[in-house]
Amino acid sequence: MAAKAKSKDSTTEERIRVAARKLFTRHGYDAVKTRDIAAESGINLALLNYYFKSKEKLFEKIMQENMKEFMQGISGIVNDEQTNLESKIKRLVEYYLDMLMSNPDMPLFVLSHAKKKGSKLNFRETFAQSHFMKQIQEAVKEGKIAPINPLNLMLNIVGLSIFPFIGRHIFQNEKGITEDAFIALMAERKKMIPGWIDAILRKK
């Protein structure tokens, strides 16, 4: 009986987190009410409060999960010693765009919280000691690529991948781009960004 109750509790908590992630990511912290989360979860408000005490605590939990997922994906790619520099760049672009196509509102979700709470994504810490960093430094030293600050390279990859999703609603509303057209545009971009980065790195 005890094991069954524990399983039920775990399932309910997961349902709340899934519902909250969906609503916070789509609408933002201020627009979502605890009753909205309860309704989306299929539970009553008292049970929601029992598990997470407040909307702020639930939001913090969801944000931590988003940031952990975000950074783990980067870390796994930049520290893979089996791939070369070109492959890492391609994989980073694919990772960002695939993740963002599944979670298109995540960048604004993360940025709004970072601005409000002063949260850090620790890009520098993740990147500084990575295998990717060593490959860039070696390639510059050997004259294979143009000299570049590795952090600038990473910012270019991230910026080129993420910006369309930050401005997605502007593009779609003002330029009349449909959802299907936007998806096709991002699929094209997945192929183009590595080429743009290669042009930046190419030895003059």
Image: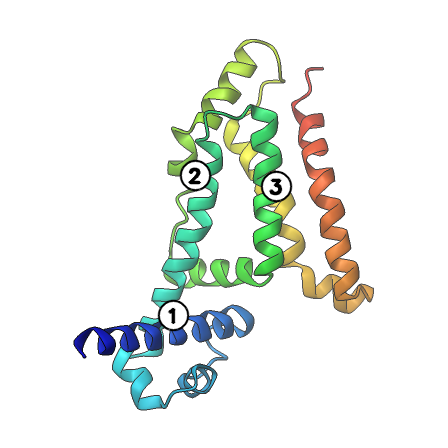
Identity of the residue furthest to the right in this view: 176
Helix or strand or loop: what does disc 1 sit on?
Answer: helix
Measured in 3D between alpha carbons, the distance from the residue under mark 3 to the one under mark 1, in whole angstroms, is 28 Å
How busy is the neighbourhood of tag 2: few (under 14 within 10 Å), some, or many (20 plus)? some
Amino acid, disc 2: Ser
How busy is the neighbourhood of tag 3: few (under 14 within 10 Å), some, or many (20 plus)? many
Amino acid, disc 3: Val
Measured in 3D between alpha carbons, the distance from the residue under mark 1 to the one under mark 2, in whole angstroms, is 24 Å
On the image, the x and y values in percent for residue 141 come to: 53, 11
How busy is the neighbourhood of tag 1: few (under 14 within 10 Å), some, or many (20 plus)? some
Tell me the residue at 54%/74% (across/down): 27
Q: Nearer the viewer, mark 3 or mark 1?
A: 3
Which residue is tagged 2?
A: 75
Direction from residue 197 to residue 177 in the image, left or right: right
Tell me the residue at 66%/31% (across/down): 197
Which residue is tagged 3?
A: 93
Helix or strand or loop: what does disc 3 sit on?
Answer: helix
Which residue is tagged 1?
A: 59
Asked if the residue under mark 1 is in contact with the one under mark 3, i.e. CB atoms within 8 Å, the reply is no
